[in-house]
Amino acid sequence: MTNSKKLLIGFEHIKEFEKDMGSPEKTSGKKLVHDKIIDLVGRLIAEGKLKSEDVLPGERQIAKSLKISRSSVREALKILGFLGVLEIKHGVRTQLQSDMSKLLINPIRFMNLLNNIDLIDLYEDRKIIEVELVKLATKNATDTDIQKMKSVLDEAKNYINEPQKFLYKELEFHDTILKISGNKTLMAMMSSINNLLIDVREKVVYLFDDLNVALNYHLKIFEAIKDRDVEKAGEMMLFHLEDAITRIKKSGYLKKQLVK
């Protein structure tokens, strides 16, 4: 982190809070104080006034400047921490999340707790998102990117009889495609989905009698990217994910609880 990043946001952004909060404690029948704080933090992020790793003032400083209770500030920060917007290190500092892809992880976990998300739904989501991401990656890939993907697959071949090690090379291959795509929104969505699926994928990899089948899907995806064949790359990714769904349905993991 650079020295400028280490500095408190301080009163520059507190003034932004003050300007819009009005008389925040007089919110009977309207938004709660902590909801207004959350909205304002969201607006500051959207406007670029709060950026990744920026440090927020302490709750006492915020409460004093906004003339509201520390409990309201504490509640707002707690919610923002739960949602993955803030990294809260008690007694040290509170800063905006350094890895913005984590912003969607906790809300999806929370949604799963409420609705018990179907595992197949998440794989269907992967089909929608990853097929488009691999098309973008095919358009954007540099020679260096293609060499990186080749190296990952070459390493995966060495682990064809070691499912766990093979899986992590497979994950690295998919992650490389996400990064090459350049679409940060879809990358964030896929990171959150992958975070939920990791335990399941560690089991799914054992559903292959021969990991060469899985490897061949990835090789076909790679060849399409290397040939700059956008539609072929999307088609191969779709076939790969549909095969995974078929194997899961046969395995008995159909309604697996993802988050304990």
Image (cartoon, helix red, strand yellow):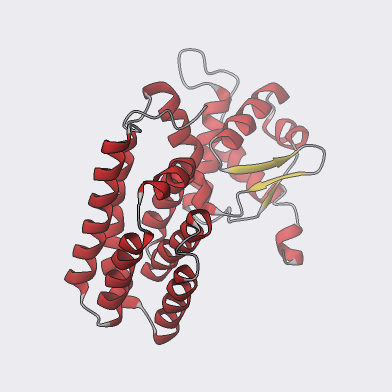
Q: Residue at x 36, y 68 (%)?
A: 181
Residue 5 location (% of width, % of height):
70, 61
Residue 114 location (% of width, % of height):
41, 22
Q: Residue at x 53, y 59 (%)?
A: 165
Farthest-out residue, top: 29
Image vertical order of residue 232 relative to residue 128, above or below: below
Farthest-out residue, bottom: 143
Whether residue 88 is visible, yes or no, is: yes
Q: Nearer the viewer, residue 169 or 93?
A: 169
Residue 201 location (% of width, % of height):
43, 46
Residue 82 location (% of width, % of height):
58, 33
Counting labels gives 0
Q: Residue at x 38, y 59 (%)?
A: 211
Image vertical order of residue 205 relative to residue 160, above or below: above
Quarter of the figure with residue 134: bottom left
Q: Is residue 189 left or right of residue 243?
A: right
Q: Nearer the viewer, residue 113 or 223?
A: 223
Q: Residue at x 29, y 49 (%)?
A: 244
Q: Is residue 174 left or right of residue 92?
A: left
Whether residue 139 is visible, yes or no, is: no
Image vertical order of residue 217 relative to residue 56, above or below: below
Farthest-out residue, right: 91
Quarter of the figure with residue 22: top right
- Image quadrant containing the N terminus: bottom right
Q: Is residue 41 left or right of residue 9?
A: left
